[in-house]
Amino acid sequence: QSVAILGAPFSKGQKRRGVEHGPKAIRDAGLVERLSNLDYAVHDFGDLAFKHLEKDEHFMHVPFPRTVGRANQLLSGAVSGAVGAGHTCIMLGGDHSLAIGSVEGHAQQCPDLCLIWVDAHADINTPLTSPSGNLHGQSVAFLLKDLQNKMPEVPGFSWMKPFLSARDLVYIGLRDVDPGEHIILKTLGIQYFSMRDIDRMGIQRVMEVTLDHLLARKQRPIHLSFDIDAFDPSLAPATGTPVNGGLTYREGIYVTEEIHNTGLLSVMDVVEVNPTLGATPEAVEATTSLAVDVISSALGQTREG
Ligand SMILES: N[C@@]1(C(=O)O)CN(C[C@@H]2CCCCN2)C[C@@H]1CCC[B-](O)(O)O
Ligand SMILES: [Mn+2]
Ligand SMILES: [Mn+2]
Ligand SMILES: [Mn+2]
């Protein structure tokens, strides 16, 4: 059992400073020690070195398209290499635009992967529907074959093409979905469990239906893309787009325990931890230790010893 840690100190998928410090903050919260205690051989690959491209004009109202595209091209190669070397890979963000490269690199090794997106947001805007232009809110749209006819050619992304089918994706934790995203979710028939669904069904049933939807027909590798803002802001305040009414600690841990128990977790992203946005050091520490807890749980740390 070996795990690779990949730091991705990147922030240009959104406009707030500080999320590039996420990887260091999560490591400083004791990630390597916690995973070593779980009997993993831990390979910390350090942080990727992202170049900021000089000329990188907006595409429509989308900022830094070439910088984001190039960062994801680099990340894709790194994730592909780590998975190809037989590691379970933990990608530490950085903003959620990094999921483009993380999932794409994973799919190079595991083309039949399925994707579980844990997030307050759907991150499925296209450049045409996005209210902000920020690419961290468009990541999924770059991955889906089903959206190809709705996506313009964004400069910086010619190195990749969409590969994921809508049926191979499930969302958990949605509570702030833009109108354009809602239309896409409904049109593509994407399976999602909003916070309302969690209130109605309970997290146990949500995980049962999620894993049945994705794995009943065929067992295959899981990519878990975990946005820390899926948690209630009272638990994870140090993040860029907090939304009230999020996952409890126990719901989040149950999600990752169930995913661990499939034995199929292959890559996990933990993104949008922004240590500069905590009001106090305690708020930052709460957020970073929560990130370490969910990673540990996804990798087999149990509550029952
Ligand atoms: N859909 C969004 C986008 O900008 O595309 C708009 N939203 C912010 C907006 C604030 C006002 C009320 C409605 N929501 C952020 C989200 C992206 C989150 C990216 B993630 O990686 O944090 O999930
Ligand atoms: Mn601008
Ligand atoms: Mn997100
Ligand atoms: Mn989010």
Image: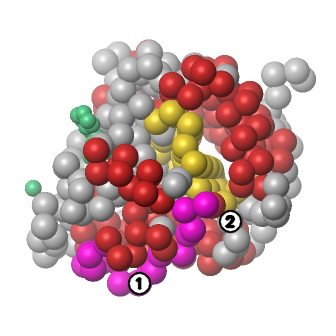
Could you tell me if residue 289 is visible in this image? no
Categorize mark 2 by other alpha carbons within 10 Å: few (<14), some (14-19), many (20+): many
Quadrant in the picture for residue 218: bottom right
Between label 1 and label 2, give the one nearer the viewer: 2
In the rendered structure, does residue 217 fall within the stretch colored magenta? no
Quadrant in which the C terminus is drawn: top right
In-front residue for pair 114/265: 114
Quadrant in the picture for residue 79: bottom right
Quadrant in which the N terminus is drawn: bottom right
Residue type (three-letter) at the residue carrying disc 2: Leu
In-front residue for pair 246/58: 246
1 or 2: tag closer to the N-terminus? 2
Residue 159 circle label: 1
User: Do labels 1 and 2 touch, CB within 8 Å?
Assistant: no
Which residues are the magenta region? Answer: 151-167
Residue 197 x %, y %: 56, 28
Q: Is residue 202 above or below residue 8?
A: above
On the rendered structure, is 207 left or right of 175? Answer: right
